[in-house]
C-alpha cells in the first residue's frame, strides 16, 4: 500500500512536471508569436504614419499656396487702390507746382 502511494505520488509529480514543461513551451510559443505580431503592427503603424504625414504635408502645402495666392491678390488690389489715390492726389500737387512756376511764385 505504501508503495502504491509512493508510486501514485511519483506519477503525479511526473505528470505535473510534464504539464509544467508543456505550459512553459506553450507560453514561449505565445510570447514569440506576440513579439512577431508586435513587430508587424509596429511596421504597419510606421507605414500608416508615414503615409499620413505625407498626405498632411501635401494638404498643408496646398492650403499655404491658396493662402499665399489670396494674400498676394489682396495686396495687389490694395496697392492698385493706393496708387490710384496717390496719382489722383498727385494731379492736384503737380497742377499747383506748375501754376507756381508759370506765375513765377517759385
Image: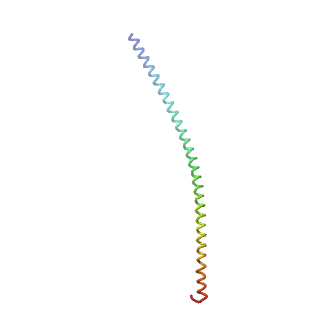
**In this view of the protein, which residue sits in the foreground, 40 or 60?**
60
- Residue 64 found in image quarter: bottom right
**In this view of the protein, which residue sits in the foreground, 64 or 41?**
64
Query: According to the image, what is the colour scheme of the structure?
Result: rainbow
**In this view of the protein, which residue sits in the foreground, 76 or 51?**
76
Task: State the residue at coordinates (40%, 14%).
Answer: 6
Residue 69 to residue 53: above or below = below
Q: Residue furthest left?
A: 2
Residue 55 to residue 42: above or below = below
Residue 38 to residue 101: above or below = above
**In this view of the protein, which residue sits in the foreground, 59 or 19?**
59
Q: Quadrant of the N terminus?
A: top left
* Count of numbered labels shown in the rendering: 0
Task: State the residue at coordinates (58%, 71%).
Answer: 82
In percent of width and height, residue 98 lies at: 61, 84
Task: State the residue at coordinates (60%, 58%).
Answer: 66
Q: Residue furthest bottom?
A: 104
In percent of width and height, residue 103 lies at: 60, 89
Task: State the residue at coordinates (58%, 62%).
Answer: 71
Q: Residue furthest top?
A: 1
Residue 19 to residue 96: above or below = above
- Residue 100 found in image quarter: bottom right
In percent of width and height, residue 23 lies at: 47, 26
Q: Quadrant of the C terminus?
A: bottom right
In percent of width and height, residue 85 lies at: 59, 73
Amino acid at each position: 500500500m505504501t508503495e502504491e502511494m509512493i508510486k501514485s505520488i511519483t506519477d503525479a509529480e511526473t505528470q505535473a512536471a510534464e504539464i509544467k514543461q508543456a505550459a512553459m513551451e506553450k507560453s514561449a510559443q505565445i510570447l514569440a508569436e506576440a513579439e512577431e505580431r508586435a513587430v508587424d503592427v509596429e511596421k504597419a503603424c510606421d507605414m500608416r504614419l508615414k503615409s499620413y504625414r505625407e498626405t498632411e504635408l501635401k494638404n498643408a502645402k496646398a492650403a499655404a499656396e491658396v493662402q499665399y495666392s489670396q494674400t498676394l491678390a489682396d495686396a495687389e488690389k490694395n496697392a492698385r487702390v493706393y496708387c490710384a489715390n496717390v496719382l489722383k492726389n498727385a494731379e492736384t500737387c503737380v497742377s499747383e507746382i506748375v501754376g507756381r512756376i508759370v506765375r513765377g511764385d517759385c
